Amino acid sequence: MELEDGRIGRIELITSDKHLYLDRGLNIFYVVSGQVTFSYLGQAKSVKQGELFVQQSALEVEIMLAKAQLVMISLQADFTDIFNLNKLIISCASQDSKRVEYQHLVNLVQALIDYVSVDSANYQANIAYGKVIEIIQYLSANFSKQLLSKQLQIRDVIEYLRLNYNQALDLVEVAKHFGVSPQYLSKFFKAKHGNNFNQELTDIRLYNAARQLVNEDKGIIDVAYDSGFNSIATFNRAFKKHYQMTPANYRLSHQNKVSVVPVEQTKHSLALLAAANKREVLTVNSRSR
C-alpha cells in the first residue's frame, strides 16, 4: 500500500523469502507471526513475533521467513531527510525489547499497520501521515545517536556515507563533519576498514545506482546524479569497472529477476491478514491510539 501515493513510502506484507536493496530511508520491519532472519553485511539477526527491526542505511538484505509473516514500512529518504535522520544513527532491534520505550514504539507501529489495513478502503491520508510522524519523532527521541562523537568510530563514518552518499561528499567535507583533519581521517579509515575512503564512497554510490537500475524506471543519467556522481562519464566508467558491464546492460540483465507486489494486492493482503487474525495481532490497545 502506498503512503501519499508513494511520496512518503509504502507498507508491504512479506510472506516469502525476499532479497531487498534498501535505500537510505527508514525501513521498519514488524514480525506479525513466526520468526524472521535478516542477513546483511556478513551478519544475521533473528527477529521474533511481535518484535521490530529498524534499518536506515543503504544495504543489501536477505530476508528468510520460516512460515512467518512480516510487514515492512519503507519510508522514502527524501521524506526522512526533512527530519534530519541522515544526521542520526537510528538503532532499534530485539536487544531493546526490555525497554519501556520499545514496547511503546511497537504499539505505534501496530497502530499504523492496523489503521491502513483495516481501513484500507477509505483511510484518511492525514491520519496515516500523523502516525508516521509520531513514529519518526519517537525513534529520533529514544533510539538514535548523533553521527558525531568525541571518539571517532569507523562504523559512524561508514554510516554517514551510507546516509549522505547522494550529497557532494569528499574527504575534506566528511573530515570537517567529524572534527578531524582530512589526513587523519584518510589514514584512520584505511587502518580500520582496509578500504580507502574514496573507494568506499564510490562503492556505496554504485550499490545505490544498481538498486535504482533494478527497482526504478529512472533514466540512467538521473540514476547517476541521484547516486552522487557528478558526471555521466564518471558514473559509466566506475560502474563498468565494478560490475563488468554498462548500466544499461545491468538493468537489462535484471529485468526478469525482480518481483514487485502490486499495490492493490498488498492492500488486499494486509486487510485479509488483519481479518484472519481477528485483529489480535495487528490491533493495538486503545490506550496507544
Image (cartoon, rainbow, N blue to C red):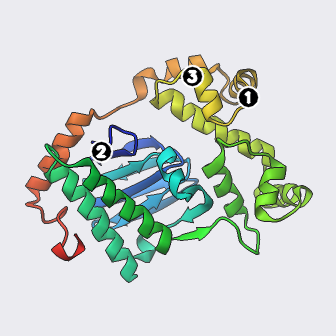
User: Residues under labels 3 and 1: Cα distance?
Assistant: 13 Å
Residues packed near mark 3 inside 10 Å, few (<14), some (14 to 19) or many (20 plus): some
Relative placement, left or right, of 3 versus 211 is left
Relative placement, left or right, of 28 versus 263 is right
Q: Which mark is residue 287?
A: none
Q: Which mark is residue 238?
A: 1
Q: Nearer the viewer, mark 2 or mark 3?
A: 3
The amino acid beneath tag 2 is Ser
The amino acid beneath tag 3 is Tyr
Relative placement, left or right, of 283 versus 37 is left
Up the image or down, 206 lies above or below 78; here it is above
Q: Indicate the position of residue 206 as horizontal and vertical percent values.
A: 65, 35
Q: Indicate the position of residue 51 as horizontal and vertical percent values.
A: 33, 67
The residue furthest front is: 126
- Within the image, what quadrant is residue 226 found in? top right
Residue depicted at x 51% and y 47%: 77
Q: In front here: 156 or 38?
A: 156
Up the image or down, 197 lies above or below 148; here it is above
Up the image or down, 152 lies above or below 19; here it is below
In the rendered structure, which disc, 3 or 1, sits on the residue that comes first in sequence? 1
In the rendered structure, which disc, 2 or 3, sits on the residue that comes first in sequence? 2
Residue at disc 1, secondary structure: helix
Q: In this view of the protein, can residue 18 be seen by the observer?
A: yes
User: Residues under labels 2 and 3: Cα distance?
Assistant: 25 Å
User: Residues under labels 2 and 1: Cα distance?
Assistant: 34 Å
The amino acid beneath tag 1 is Ala
In the rendered structure, which disc, 2 or 1, sits on the residue that comes first in sequence? 2
Which image quarter holds the N terminus?
top left
Residue at disc 3, secondary structure: helix
User: What residue is disc 2 on?
Assistant: 16
User: What residue is disc 3 on?
Assistant: 250
Residue depicted at x 70% and y 26%: 235
